Image (cartoon, rainbow, N blue to C red):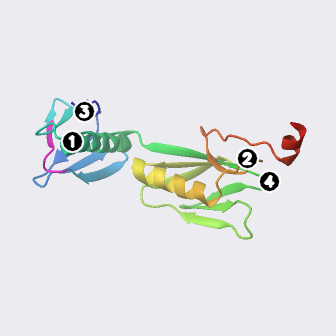
């Protein structure tokens, strides 16, 4: 059985999960609401604040869908109750971020500032000028936006300049001077 798919999803207080006839799951919580259409082969059962997903057979496609839809529904429940966030660090001389309303302006070494608008249910914050926190209820949207911002100026291995995740480790390379010193 799928190790991820067989895990039950506990529904916290304040969160409601409804499944309609088309197997669409709607999750409402204090932070908002999310919906996802689940394949008809996967059945959902809700008992005493616990949601379980089951599959009809042990075929490879059913196993794959079982784990996938369990993870998607679990991420929706977590998103509407606590939310998700990604932290990006801007490393480099003059690199900084400024939040104005629902958009962030990045100064990352280009001749012009880069302005990014926040999608629905996503907020930007800057606890420090070189730290950008992206928060939202959808794990997919927050992750994609963080990856898109990181792609604007990927961290380079020689000086470490660029935009990186807070917990990311950049493997540094030795430059020309260091290579000559080894001989």
In the rendered image, the residue lying farthest to the front is: 183
User: What whole-number distance in Å separates the C-alpha atoms at marks 3 and 2?
Assistant: 40 Å
Mark 2, mark 4: which one is toward the viewer?
A: 2
User: What whole-number distance in Å separates the C-alpha atoms at marks 2 and 4?
Assistant: 11 Å
Mark 1, mark 2: which one is toward the viewer?
A: 1
Residue 171 visible in the current orientation: yes
Q: Earlier in the sequence, mark 1 or mark 3?
A: 3
Q: Earlier in the sequence, mark 3 or mark 4?
A: 3
Q: Look at mark 3 in the image and give the residue it sits on.
A: 2
Instruction: Check the picture and name the quadrant holding the N terminus.
Output: top left
Marks 1,4: beta carbons within 8 A: no
Provide the residue span drawn in magenta: 39-45
Mark 3, mark 4: which one is toward the viewer?
A: 3
Q: Earlier in the sequence, mark 1 or mark 4?
A: 1
In the rendering, which numbered label is found on residue 93?
4
Marks 1,2: beta carbons within 8 A: no
List x then y, in percent, for residue 154: 64, 54
Q: Look at mark 2 in the image and give the residue it sits on.
A: 160
Vertical side of 135 occupied by 48: above or below: above
Query: For residue 72: magenta?
Result: no
Crowd rating for badge 4 (residues with CA inside 10 Å; few <14, some 14–19, many 20+) = few
In the rendering, which numbered label is found on residue 60?
1
Image-based side of 38 in relation to 68, left or right: left
Q: Earlier in the sequence, mark 1 or mark 2?
A: 1
User: What whole-number distance in Å separates the C-alpha atoms at marks 1 and 2?
Assistant: 43 Å
User: What whole-number distance in Å separates the C-alpha atoms at marks 1 and 3?
Assistant: 10 Å
List x then y, in percent, for residue 167: 59, 37
Instruction: Check the picture and name the quadrant holding the C terminus.
Output: top right
Crowd rating for badge 1 (residues with CA inside 10 Å; few <14, some 14–19, many 20+) = few
């Amino acid at each position: 059985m799928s190790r991820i798919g067989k895990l039950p999803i506990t529904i916290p207080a304040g969160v409601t999960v409804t499944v309609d006839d088309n197997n669409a799951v709607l999750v409402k919580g204090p932070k908002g609401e999310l919906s996802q259409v689940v394949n008809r082969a996967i059945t959902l059962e809700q008992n005493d604040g616990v949601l379980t997903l089951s599959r009809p057979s042990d075929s490879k496609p059913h196993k794959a869908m079982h784990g996938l839809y369990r993870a998607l529904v679990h991420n929706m429940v977590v998103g509407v109750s606590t939310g998700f966030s990604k932290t990006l660090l801007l490393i480099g001389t003059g690199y900084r971020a400024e939040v104005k309303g629902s958009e962030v302006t990045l100064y990352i070494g280009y001749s012009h500032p880069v302005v990014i608008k926040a999608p629905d249910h996503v907020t930007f914050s800057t606890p420090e000028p070189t730290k950008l926190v992206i928060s939202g209820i959808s794990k997919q949207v927050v992750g994609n936006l963080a990856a898109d911002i990181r792609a604007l100026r990927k961290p380079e291995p020689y000086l470490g300049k660029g935009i990186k995740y807070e917990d990311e480790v950049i493997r540094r390379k030795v430059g020309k001077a260091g290579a000559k010193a080894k001989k």
